[in-house]
Amino acid sequence: MTNPFLSPSTLPYSLPPFASITDDDYGPAFDAGFAEQLAEVEAIATDPAEPTFENTVAALERSGAILTRVQHVFFNKTSSDSTEATDALELELAPRLAAHADAIRLDPRLFARLRSVHERRDALDLTAEQRYLVERLVAEATRSGAALADDDKVRLRDLNGRLSTLSTRFEKNLLADTNDLAVVVDDVAELDGLDAGAIAAAAEAARERGLEGRYVITLVLFSGHPYLASLTDEGLRDRIMQASLSRGRRGGDHDNRELVLEIARLRAERAELLGFASHAAYVTAGETAGTPGAVADLLGRLAPPAARNARAEQAELERVAGRTIRASDWAFYTERVRAEEHDVDTAAMRPYFEAERVLQDGVFFAAGLLYGLRFAERADLTGYHPDARVFEVTDADGGDVGLYVLDLYTRDSKRGGAWMNPLVSQSSLTGLPTVVVNNLNVPKPPADQPTLLTLDEVTTFFHEFGHALHGLVARVTYPSFSGTNVFRDFVEFPSQVNEMWMLWPEVLANYAVHHETGDRLPQRLVDALLASQGFNQGFETSEYLAAALLDQAWHALSSAEAAAVTDVEAFEQEALAAVGLDLASVPTRYSSTYFAHTFSGGYDAGYYSYIWSEVLDADTVEWFEQNGGLTRDNGDRFRARLLGVGGAKDPLEAYRDFRGRDARVEPLLARRGLA
Ligand SMILES: [Zn+2]
């Protein structure tokens, strides 16, 4: 048997041959991938010819084909359908991948060649994308330590290896603790308030765990839980909230507190080694934000009015509840106020959000009207799991766009949250098309029942599909710029914009149809929903900003300051109090011990990115609204000037090209009630 990763896929759109991939293939493929790329880099570094764009930069971009193939498939597998074997391999691979990346970025011969091309870039007759690539590669290599002295490089490699191991361990602990802390309910009466589908899903989850006849509520990634909005049993609400908040901080094998402290300390040390005052300074230097100060300015501008709004909301909730409310009560009374004062009953909307209709007649429909894209399921193409469906995407003129894989349902082998991954990254240099996958965590109903989505899940669907679109329609030459390979504080922007279409009248009318009666979602519910959009924004903005500020606080530390922190809970409390976001009833969206974005997921010192890019999002939504909304002309402009560019251009330049000016913060302030 030959390893399926060693040669290019022969399937349509280079879809990985999932049917013939086994857990045993990954390890050998990584070995071969490391060796292949190191040999390719060695050939570049020792090339006797004068460095040119072609023999250095393009050659580097072409290198590592096997590694790229196996990485895409493996990391999708470990996040959405992990096994004991892939978990073990991931732990073993983390330091090896870090070391491999370092071996390339820190190679002094390669760096000298890159710098040589960079210095002569004006004389080399480069395209704009080539020139930008050279600049980015040199900046990245410098930030990665390529200019360091040899003994500093040794220390840097140690730090990178240790940090990647710690992050992987953090993620594994979190998944294990999240599963262990799933809330078991004995009596169905306690589930009062949940609809039949949710109760069936809880019974199914219990069966899967061998708890026949009982009910299991699995935790989600953030501090609260979607069911807190409807469960009438106060005690059960509190059990769910306490279970969620206690993740990673209750002693035992899955405690993440020591990992948090060590990660913060080592990141600070690494930043200093690279010449930055803190990890936050190091990170933002490579983002559109530029400095931690710019981030602090934006967050600092938003925090006081957000906390003020949250306090006002709490007073209103307590008036309705007739008592002081706790964090676990917030969503429940929010729904009551929403229903009573705004006449919005989100639970009553679920029967109108049948997943297949949301997908075909909502998500795909909007992309069709805007960009002319067409979607056809390819049942003949096998995904990596029976629930992963494959769709072919074509342009209005029939031209190939790529493949879209959708993996909707939650399972114990899938990490929490929702996300998009590339399975094949488009590049005209390598000749590869694009294949992307969306993962959601929707509870799976029994086979005879429809999948009904919550309002939040519909939002998430449109959001993640926005990432998928960004990946699907980008057309770049070099793999480094492919699809969503853009700055982290820019990458959420296109996905946030895509959320605007979920309530767009023409789209909503097309997909929000009652799964039994066929009736359209009553206009009364739609109007009330639109009218209530500023509702609960104090809470939502505060819980988000608290997490963003916490993430900045951990990473604003020098290594000496980080070494002095010994108590995770006390540090959190102080950091939140300092900005006035230590609200007892509004827990931070993620506490440090389950803050996967910042301690394992690649959003370290970057969780601010969501609101940073929302400035662009709100400004863009305003543009669409002022220019006729959902039209092919508008979609084509956004696609041509922004989505299609991928990372091949300075993102703020691309934004100016699309919008005609820089973004303004006012639409965001208005949207979130912070003006
Ligand atoms: Zn996103």
Image: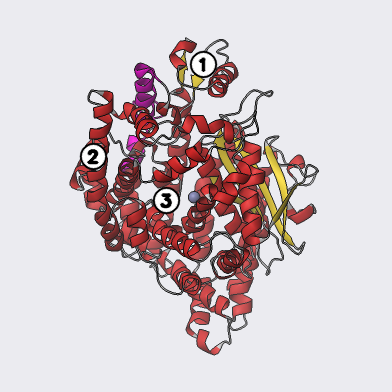
Seen in the picture, residue 215 relative to 124 is either above or below; the reply is: above
The answer to whether the residue bearing label 3 lies less than 8 angstroms from the nearest atom of ligand 1 is: no
**Gap in angstroms between the C-alphas marked 1 and 3:** 34 Å
Mark 2 closeness class: few <14, some 14–19, many ≥20 residues within 10 Å: some
Q: Are marks 3 and 2 in contact (CB under 8 Å)?
A: no
Magenta segment: does it hold 363? no
The answer to whether the residue bearing label 1 lies less than 8 angstroms from the nearest atom of ligand 1 is: no
Tell me the residue at 59%/40% (across/down): 512
Q: Which residue is mark 2?
A: 312
Quadrant of the image occupied by residue 427:
bottom right
Inspect this view and state whether residue 491 appears. Answer: yes
Mark 2, secondary structure of its residue = helix
Tell me the residue at 62%/42% (across/down): 511
First in residue order: circle 3 vs circle 2:
2
Instruction: Measuring from the top left, give residue 167's x and y in whole percent.
Output: 43, 43
**Gap in angstroms between the C-alphas marked 3 and 2:** 31 Å
Towards the viewer: 66 or 449: 449
Seen in the picture, residue 211 relative to 353 is either above or below; the reply is: above
Mark 1, secondary structure of its residue = strand
Q: Which residue is mark 3?
A: 603
Quarter of the C terminus within the rendering? bottom left
Mark 3, secondary structure of its residue = loop
Q: Which residue is mark 1?
A: 215
**Gap in angstroms between the C-alphas marked 1 and 2:** 36 Å
Name the amino acid type tagged 2. Ala
Query: What residue span does the magenta drawing correspond to?
Result: 232-261
Instruction: Measuring from the top left, give residue 278's x and y in whole percent.
Output: 29, 58
